[in-house]
Amino acid sequence: MKILDCTLRDGGYYNNWFFDNALVDSYLKAMKSSSIDMIELGSRNFDSIGFKGPFYYTTEQFIETLVLPDGPDYGVMVDAKTLLSFEGGVGIALNRLFCEKSCSKLGFVRVAFHFKEINSAAEIVGALDSLGYRVIINLMQITEQSDDCIKSTAKLLQKVSGISALYFADSLGSMKAKDVSRIVRLLKSEWTGDLGIHAHNNMGLALENTMAAIHAGVELCDSTVAGMGRGAGNVETELLLVELETQGVGDYHLGSVGALAVTEFGKLKIRYGWGSSIYYFLAAKYRIHPTYVQTILSDSHYGDDERLEAISRIPLLSGMVNFDKTALARVFNGDSVFFEPVELESKKLNDIDFIENEAVVLIANGNELLKHLKWVAYYLNQSQVPVFNINEPIEELSEYVDFCFFLHNARLVDFKDSLNSSAYHSIIPLNRFSASEFNGVELDRIYNYPVKIEPNSFEYGSSGGVIPEDLTAVYAISALIQLGIKKIFLIGFDGYGQGDVRQKEMSDAFSLITRMNPELKLVALTETTYPVEQRSIYAPS
């Protein structure tokens, strides 16, 4: 039995493959003290657009800067897709990425394959074997394959010379112990070499699944310190060490790994938030690629309800087991290409004909609204101007609100039951929603104002608007300008905290709007950090 720790490679999905030098030194020493057998230092890749830290490339030159303790066997991972897509071919790609083993401190190379790429295994393995490396094959998304496919793949690989071990990865985090045992049995029916498992922790089962694999005869298992790894992460090295030591498997010791997991990696976990959660649990149940969830969680635009709604929509996509950034954007933006066509007879924005004022109140439900709630109610009662709200209004002000703006699906889903009974109407971009989301809704209470998101753009017209960011407030202002409004009093537009990306996006959007519409006046009546005119709701009219 051997443990392969891949913290620096898999954990890099959260910190862009950059680890502090002191932390790397502590990590390597801890691995040795716990008798970890193998360490995957990182990935090996060609030059990539945008910044990636050193463990994304793990070049020979960079490895020379590391103090690698004697004992563990060191290696890197390369994606078969990287090699197969190289313009010069697999042989040239490998010669560009790898030197002769005699010139390297690496002992093994792990190659990640999708099943559709496995016919290229012999060429890739042969080239790496000829360079002197031990080659490990890592099969991804095995849960999406039939039993016959798994057996035939194992049979094919059994005939490939130079493979030292065969791994299978629970890529979608959906395995249970019985699935692990079944897959081990299928692979062993055709493969006679060492087997390994890479378990994901979406459902909190990574440790249980790893132990099930060991009891089923697997000789290698992956782990990472504090479980740091893409998506929900992996089995925690420190927990695996304790479990193996308790069961008398191998000669492992918790050593300083436990302290490192709690201290330095504990801080990283708080910062980046990997680990089992309802989000990753749903991803496993829906069989969704973990990068979808990780991307959704890292986007500060959305609240928990919107994130859960987006995850529930991803199964409507095709090919959700493979990450597609464009497809994810369409999930949030409500691109109807992924849903049934929206064929709803609703009113259009320009059908609103009772707004005679050139000034309106636009309310966001920020803390400043609650702080001054009593006077806001008094002001709305006295001003007699049309009142619009971002999303649903708070109960104390609902009687004053004429219209609500909804831009995000989850916001509407949460409030859909109230649409028919509320006193106000709604303005919604139907192009961002599926028809089924309006089942039971009285459409004559909805005004449709389509919208598209295009950076650095702000347009409005009878057929819809174009806004620079996916922000309901900006959508609302676009619609109000189209209605002929010249002055918008803002209440509850507090602004976001310093460093929050939404603060910059909102500020930039307000600056763009006022620059492109000099006749428009945006006046905040409660405290705000946005670049708009500031007045007081308490000032005499």
Image (cartoon, rainbow, N blue to C red):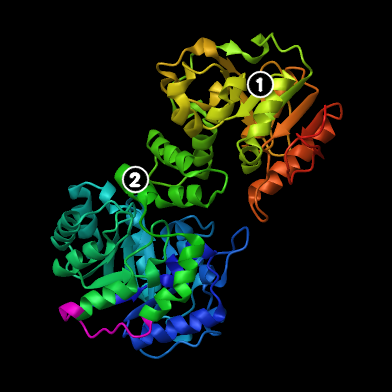
Relative to the observer, which residue lies in front, 232 or 218? 232
Which residue carries the number 2 mark?
282
Label 2 residue SS? helix
Q: Position of residue 306 (x, y in %)?
A: 48, 39
At 15% from the left and 59% from the top, the residue drawn is 181
| Mark 1: amino acid | Gly
Please say if the residues under marks 1 and 2 sit with CB atoms less than 8 Å apart: no
Question: Tag on residue 444?
Answer: none
Q: How far is mark 1 from mark 2, CA to CA?
A: 35 Å
Q: Determine the residue located farthest toward the bottom in the rendered image.
A: 70
| Mark 2: amino acid | Leu
User: Does 293 appear in magenta?
Assistant: no
Q: Position of residue 43 (x, y in %)?
A: 47, 68
Identify the image quadrant of the N terminus.
Answer: bottom left
At 55% from the left and 33% from the top, the residue drawn is 333
At 48% from the left and 50% from the top, the residue drawn is 297
Relative to the observer, which residue lies in front, 493 or 371? 371
Question: Tag on residue 464?
Answer: 1
Q: Quadrant of residue 476?
A: top right
Q: Position of residue 308 (x, y in %)?
A: 42, 41
Badge 1 or badge 2: first in the primary sequence:
2
Q: Is residue 136 visible?
A: yes
Q: Quadrant of residue 448?
A: top right
Main SS of residues in magenta: loop
Q: Determine the residue located farthest toward the right in the rendered image.
A: 518
Relative to the observer, which residue lies in front, 443 or 312? 443
Q: Is residue 192 rendered to the left or right of residue 167?
A: left
Vertical order, 380 against 162 (above or below): above
Q: Is residue 280 rendered to the left or right of residue 16?
A: left
Which segment did they paint magenta? 246-257
